[in-house]
Amino acid sequence: MQVWQASYYDGLSAERHDVTVHAHALGLTITKADGTRLEWSAAELRQTQGDLPGEPCRLERAGTIGEALVVRDDGFAAELRRVVPGAKVKSVNKLPAWRLAIAAVLVAGFVAAAYFFAVPALADQLVRFVPVSWEEALGDHVVSSMKESDFCHDPRMLGAVREIVDKLIAAGPKTPYHYKVYVFDTEQINAFAAPGGDIVVFTGLLKRTDSPEELAGVLAHELQHVQRRHTTRALIRGASLNLLISAMTGSDTGFGKVVGTAGDLGMLRYSRSDEAEADRRGMELLEAAKIDPHGMVRFFKLLESRGLAGPKNLNFLSDHPDTEARIQVLSRMAAEAHYKPIPLLPGVDWNKIKTGCGRHPRPDDPTD
C-alpha cells in the first residue's frame, strides 16, 4: 500500500493540514496528524490541477466549497488513474499547441499595449495628485545618494549659479517649489532636475560654457522639467507598484528600492513631447527674464561641433533622437524673440567662476 504526503484544506478556513493519502479502488483515505480519517469516494474526486509536468496535483471534493487536497509528488496523478478508475481526473482540458501559441501572442500584445499606452496615460492622470511634499522628499533622497566629497562649495560658483536660477524663477509664474541648487564635481557634461526643485549642475557642463547666458539656457530647460512635473511623470511611467502607492499616499518609505540614485535621474529619458515643452517653455522663461536666448543655442552648437553631444558625454542633448533638428527649432525660437537682452552677472569673470570648485565639507543646507 503506497502512502502519499499531501496538504488538506477543509474549505472552512485558510489553514493547511499535513496529511497522508492512500488511494484504493473505492477512492481515497485521508489521514490527519491526529489520526482522524476522511474518506473521499471515487465519484467525488475532481482534478483541477496537475496535468502539466512538475505541477502539483490538486483534487477537489464534489459537493463542497473549497475542500481540497494537494499532492506535490509527480507520480500521484498517474497512480490515481491506475488505482481509482472511477475518479474524474481529466477535468483539465488541454488546448492544442497552436491555440496555446496564439493565446501567448495575444497576451504578449495586450501587455505591450498596456505598457506603451495605458501606463503613460495613467501616469499623466496620477501625476496631478502627487503631493509636492512627496516630490521634495524624493528629490532630497536622490541628492543624498550622491558622494558628499564631490559636491562643490566654492561660494563664488554656487552664488553665480544661484543668482541665475533666482532670476529665472522670479521671471516665471508663481511656483509651489522651493528650488535648491547643487554643483557636483564630475567631468560628465550634464545637469538634471530632481522632483521637487533640486537642480544639480555638473562641473563638466559648467566648464564648457562661455557665458552665464549659456548656462541660463540649460537651467531654464531643467526648471521646466520640475515645474511641468516631467520628471515625476517619467518616474511614474516606469514605476513599480511600491512607487505608485508611495506617490499617492505621500509616503517616503522605500525610495532607495524604487528609485535608486542620482545616476538614475541623470540618465532619465523624457518623452519627446516633454522635451519639446521644456525647450519651448524654457525659451519663454528666458524671454520673460530678458536673458539672451541665443546663449542656449550657442552652447549646444559648440558642443555638437566638438563632438561632445553624444550619449557618452551630454545626456542633456542625447535624450533627443535628432540633435540637429532640435537646435534648428531652438534657433528659430531665439530668432523670433524681439527684446533687448540684459547681460547676466555683469562685471563677473565667468572663466574664473566656471572653474572654481572648492573642496570643503558639505554644509547642512544647499544654496537656497
Image (cartoon, rainbow, N blue to C red):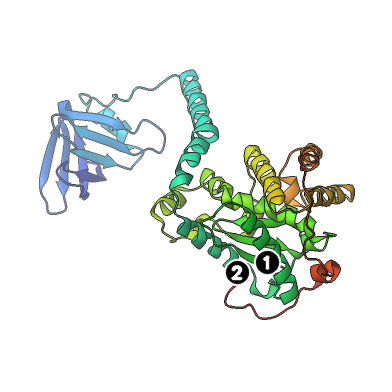
Q: Which mark is residue 368?
A: 2
Quadrant containing the C terminus is bottom right
Farthest residue to the left: give it: 36
Task: Kindly give the residue lying farthest to the right in the view shown.
Answer: 305
Q: Position of residue 95 (x, y in %)?
A: 41, 21
**Residue 3 at x, y percent in the picture:** 24, 44
Q: Residue at x 82, y 52 (%)?
A: 299
Seen from this angle, which residue lies furthest bottom? 361
Left or right of 36 in this view: 277:
right
**Mark 2 crowd level (few <14, some 14–19, many ≥20, 10 Å Cα):** few
> Which badge, 1 or 2, is on the more N-terminal residue?
1
Task: Say above or below: 47 vs 70.
Answer: above
Q: Are marks 1 and 2 in contact (CB under 8 Å)?
A: yes
Q: Secondary structure at mark 2?
A: loop
Q: Is residue 125 left or right of residue 69?
A: right
Q: Nearer the viewer, residue 11 or 139?
A: 139
Image mark for residue 113:
none
Q: Is residue 3 left or right of residue 328?
A: left
Quadrant assignment, res 51: top left
Relative depth, front residue between 109 and 299: 299
Q: Quick one: label 1, few (<14), some, or many (20+) residues within 10 Å?
A: some
Q: At x 20% / y 30%, what residue is drawn?
A: 45
Determine the image quadrant of residue 63. Answer: top left
- At label 2, the amino acid type is Asp
Q: Residue at x 66, y 53 (%)?
A: 222
- Is residue 71 depicted above or below 107 in this figure? below
> CA separation, marks 1 and 2?
7 Å
Residue 189 in sight: no
Q: In the rendered image, which quarter contains the N terminus?
A: top left
User: Mark 1 is on which residue type?
Assistant: Arg
What residue is shown with label 1?
162
